[in-house]
Amino acid sequence: MTQRSPSHAGGNWHALDISSVLEQLGTVRDFGLSKAEAARRLESVGRNKLPEQKPPAVWQIFLRQFANPLIFVLILAAVVAVAIGDWTDAVFIAAVLLVNAMIGGYQEWRAEQNSLALQQMLHMRATVYRDGATQEIESDEVVPGDILVLESGNRVPADARLLTAQSLQIDESFLTGESIAVAKNAEWVGDPGTVVADHLNMAFAGAVVTRGRGKGIVVETGKKTVVGQLAQSVAGERTGNAPLLERMHGFARLVAGIVLLIAIIIGSGGVAVHGMAHIQEVFLFTVALAVAAIPEGLPAALTVALSIATSRMAKRGVIVRRLAAVEGLGSCTLVASDKTGTLTCNELTVRAIELPDAARLEVTGEGFEPVGEVRRENRSVAMDEVKGLEALVTAGVLCNEADLSRHDGRWSWRGDPTDIALLSLGQKLGMGRQEYADRYERFFEIPFEAEHRFSATYHKHRSENRVFVKGATERVLEMCDVVAERFTELQGAAESMAKEGFRVMALASGLVAEDFRPKDFNPELRSGHPSGL
């Protein structure tokens, strides 16, 4: 199969239909690229990597510690001290400068090493079609024309025009500031002038798939991606000085000015009193006084203080590459943000449970880590103590696309925050997903769709087929055999929770006919027993 080289669409890939994109990139939809063609394109366009700056050498980091106006004044003072034969002051100033450079250089060198180690840990892999079969490759080997396979939890390796999107939602907050994941639509075609935040048929490099699955054709890689262009524009901007450096510059100028003024006054007075015959003695005295007035210990004291602050930041998982940045962070007195998602961890936690035949239950704990318990009337309860609790948790664990697991004593997760929160609730009650997945064999699923407002999974359990449903309260209640009075009561309970600031959803489960087949699916399914969350 022959494949031609791709042509460029001027960056307006979102304004082209799928057939035009495939034609311009010379790719077959269900085949992808051949390995030979992929290798040729990789050689032509380069690896799918953002521009990287070479890390500074140790001697460069060491010399960088002397790039300070006050240090320049001290060096000048040391030179003058040598010139007038004051070796004591010269040696002391040199020792202070050397210790200052060693402390600051070591801290910044360690930060650079931590930063490099972090970058090496962030290697991504991508699933692409090569020669008609899916293959997992390093993300930097992705080339324009590759057909990507995207699933929940994946990080998008390059800019891609979507070919299919099944309940696909992607977190693009790092580009747009919107904390809510964007629902993608492969059939959508926009105008050339549409802003990036509204490109519903595109997946951008660096974004994370939070829900669903899809396929896309890679249109841009490396520095030509949206995030690559952003990185280049930021790198090209001249950065300002930290507040500490600005104050140091001002202080150095002030010290130099005062010392110079005093030296002129004393020198002039000495010449006026003793005359020109003693000009050499007056000059040496004036220079010695100027050198003594320079605060030699100030740079070292500042460096030690900043080094301590840097070490404290490192213990909290923050890498500070320049010492002055610590003081710059501490100088912030006001943070302006128009999105709560900018200030939060984007983590949800189940905090309250409303069961049909029981009082409300409270759930303790914060975030995704399953640390907490379920309480009723200020008393911890187990799964089997409350009727309906096990059915609710089972539905939440099985009707779920996320992962929550523990490795080496640490919890890790991926997927939609709502799904992870439900898995965390199950873990708090001792119900792991894998244990139940082994007993409930999934044979069909209905991904979440905005028009349906629910998702469902079908499982074989012993001799029964069961369906578990999760979605909007009113939508799930419509599917259940609930009398009108009970329907109104449950709907009222959901509205009451919403007014308290909770994000409310409902879970339900029910039996499915033994001869059920996926083709029999009807969105208006009306069976099951509701459990509200």
Image (cartoon, grey):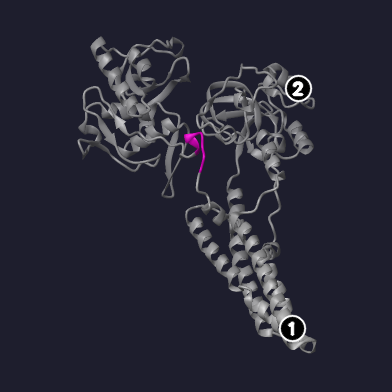
The image position of residue 509, as x and y in percent, is 33, 20
> Taking the image as drawn, is residue 62 in sight?
no
Report the side of 213 relative to 396 (left or right): right
The image position of residue 308, as x and y in percent, is 51, 63
Q: Is residue 495 above or below residue 63?
A: above
Is residue 144 or residue 38 the one in the foreground? 144
Query: What label does residue 272 carry, if any?
Result: 1
Report helix, strand or loop for mark 1. Answer: helix
Q: Which residues are magenta?
A: 335-342
Mark 1: amino acid: Ala
The image position of residue 121, as x and y in percent, is 58, 48
Mark 2: amino acid: Gln
Q: Can you tell which quarter of the image residue 481 is in?
A: top left
Query: What label does residue 24 carry, if any?
Result: 2
Report helix, strand or loop for mark 2. Answer: helix
Is residue 175 or residue 254 the one in the foreground? 254
Report the side of 338 relative to 77 (left or right): left
Residue shown at 42% from the left, 30% from the top: 418
Residue shown at 62% from the left, 62% from the top: 248
